[in-house]
Amino acid sequence: MASFKGILRNLLDRPGGVPLTPYQKIVKAAEGRAERLRELRELDELPRPDMSDLAEFCAVAREAADRTLGLRPYDVQLLGTLALLDGKVAEMATGEGKTLSGAMAAAGYALQGKRVHVISVNDYLAKRDAEWMGPFYEALGVGVGWIDQNSTPEERREAYAKDVTYGPVSEIGFDVLRDRLRTDASEIIVPAPEVALIDEADSVLVDEARVPLVMAGAADPGNAVPEMAALVRQLVRGYHYEIDEQARNVYLTPKGADTVENLLGVDLYDEHEPGTLIELNLALHAHALLTRDVDYIVRDGKVQLINPSRGRVALLQRWPNGLQAAVEAKEALAPSEKGEILDSITVQGLIRRYPQICGMTGTAVAVSEQLGEFYGLKVAVIPSNRPCVRVDEPDRIYPTVPDKDAALVEEIQTVHETGRPILIGTLDVAESENLAKLLQRRGLEPVVLNAKNDAEEAAIIARAGERGAITVSTQMAGRGTDIRLGEGVAELGGLYVIGSGRHASSRLDDQLRGRAGRQGDPGGSVFFVSMKDELITQFVPDERPPAADADGVVRHRRGAYLVGHAQRVAEGVNLEIHRNTWRYTRLLEHQRELILEWRDKVLHGDAAAKALAEADPERWAAMPEDTREETARQIVLYAIDRCWTEHLAFLTDLREGIHLRALGRMSPIDEFHREAVAEYKALLAEVEKRSLEAFEAPEPDLKRPTATWTYLVQDNPFGTEWDRILKRVTAASRRG
């Protein structure tokens, strides 16, 4: 029988189980010091707070924010600040002032002498928040800067030199990657990591966690074959090819393989000529599984990926393994250049570099298990300043998508006639544009916010609460931007949020609902769902939906159950993908740490000189004394970087085929680790060997890429070729 202490510990570790009582005592003590601070006439008379007295810090920070920003923090904002300073993820509802709570916490860490990176999901929020909170930081004697994708190296250096630096997660990651390839210590830009304070923590730590950030060089043109794109357009689903039930893999049927072989005059499965099969599979993926205006858009003659969790264009993001070029061939665009990966790091690996992590978001409890499992973080649920009075209606469920769309348009028109503002959240760009056209046919004029006009996001979403407004938005929905109600809107019921379908994650639904009902405002929300929505057909394909009532609405309780069940299955699939990715990347991150420790000793010290002088004293003695140490450094750095690049390529190839080991009843992950460790040990010896060979050569070849660039790699959502082979073998064995 479990002990009482064990039961109590489990209760305290439940989602949102961080007790707030210690924070509340500090906030109460801070209120007792407010009058003394209010009496100070000048801003510069505010005392510099001693961080050993958190009540004094809260009182000073509150007064500084009031005087510099015109924002006097509520008690709940101070609770959020204290949770962040305690290394927790603070769940604060939309409109509760997370930006100011984060700024106060960042200032508190800075006053402890710690360098803080406030990590956001995009450029706009990083710049806006740094500039908005600037006067507050200045009042406390804390320097603040920001970076975005347009920042120059000097601007980045200046921003990182500040006590607090705001930046999007991708740009901070790219700067880390660039620094890892520096050959001159004076060129390093990013200081040693200390504190990461993460805005929209669920998005960064969970949704973005698997995304690899890449540093590449030695560019070559893409190699997709336009003829292959034309060929796959002739193939018919269900006859020439099949798509699996998760819509993540596509493969030729025997008839399809025969057809392609006859058209091309080749043996697709010739193991000595695998290139044709690879090109065909890439073209088939692009054709069958990637949809324009859903998975990507074409803008300015380029394919731009859409981040599925945010609905925004994922700048500089690509698909791996030639899939990017295949999509470009599909769209009749010139293939973008590709190159050799010099180094990479996942967002999860980037964040775990920081000794101290904290964050804030409106939806943390739903992912508390992942926050604890992958980052050791606990969630503190901060109460709202005013009770939420938003009315969340049950889902309205319909048999088919056309039925749903018709009812959705009717609802929008009916509510619009009252003057009540409406925000409709759609699942993708194509859906947002289709809905806008349906509304326009009714004489309505919606404002559309999607990945095609994301630069106008803040301005569009800020007006969504005005009387008579109809705003159609993808999942971006202006996170980080307040929607204030226009005149007379509160009397109409406040902002009305409608979801055009359930997302694969309940958090995304909650985020959409949270656009209404901020700070005690009235508001409402409802989701329109169809039994033929992709969520249902993909994750519970074998379930038979209940029939609709006479008016076309599915009211049987099984309908609501299937929607919830499909969402839970989808969340489980995504969690397992996250876990599996981390199982493979965890060892790589450890090896990267070891190689970087070695590289830093070479870059900042005389480790290279000592090693080569000991290995070949005669050659060392014969070299010019004023240049030999720098020459040794460059030789060893080149050998480390070159061998690491080759190691990454080896691990990529290893992971591609490792799943076949399961056919021999071996554990793929154990086999991957075994071979990766052995290869890393060989790498160390190879670095020493190549360094000595270059040292003894009359003219060592230390040629580096003439150009490098950074981008994000979209994890291949379709699995590898070996994944598909294994799945087909497993399915066949079950049928047998």
Image: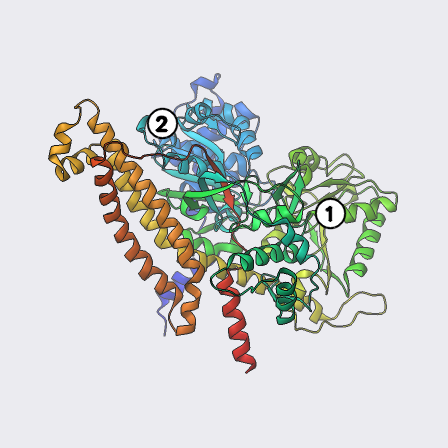
Question: Residue 421 location in percent, x, y?
Answer: 77, 42
Q: Mark 1 points at which residue?
A: 432
Q: In this view, does 363 lie to the left or right of 656?
A: right
The answer to whether marks 2 and 1 mark residues whose Cβ atoms lie closer than 8 Å is: no
Residue 627 visible at all: yes
Question: Residue 440 location in percent, x, y?
Answer: 84, 44
Which quarter of the figure is the N terminus placed in?
bottom left
Return the mark for residue 187: 2
Q: Is residue 366 left or right of residue 655?
A: right
Q: Residue at x 35, y 69 (%)?
A: 3
Mark positioned earlier in the residue sequence (2 or 1): 2
- Per the image, label 1 sits on a secondary structure element best described as helix
Q: Local crowd at mark 1 within 10 Å, few (<14), some, or many (≥20)?
A: many
Q: Taking 225 as reference, is 488 above or below it?
A: above
Question: Residue 434 location in percent, x, y?
Answer: 77, 49
Q: Residue at x 28, y 57 (%)?
A: 678
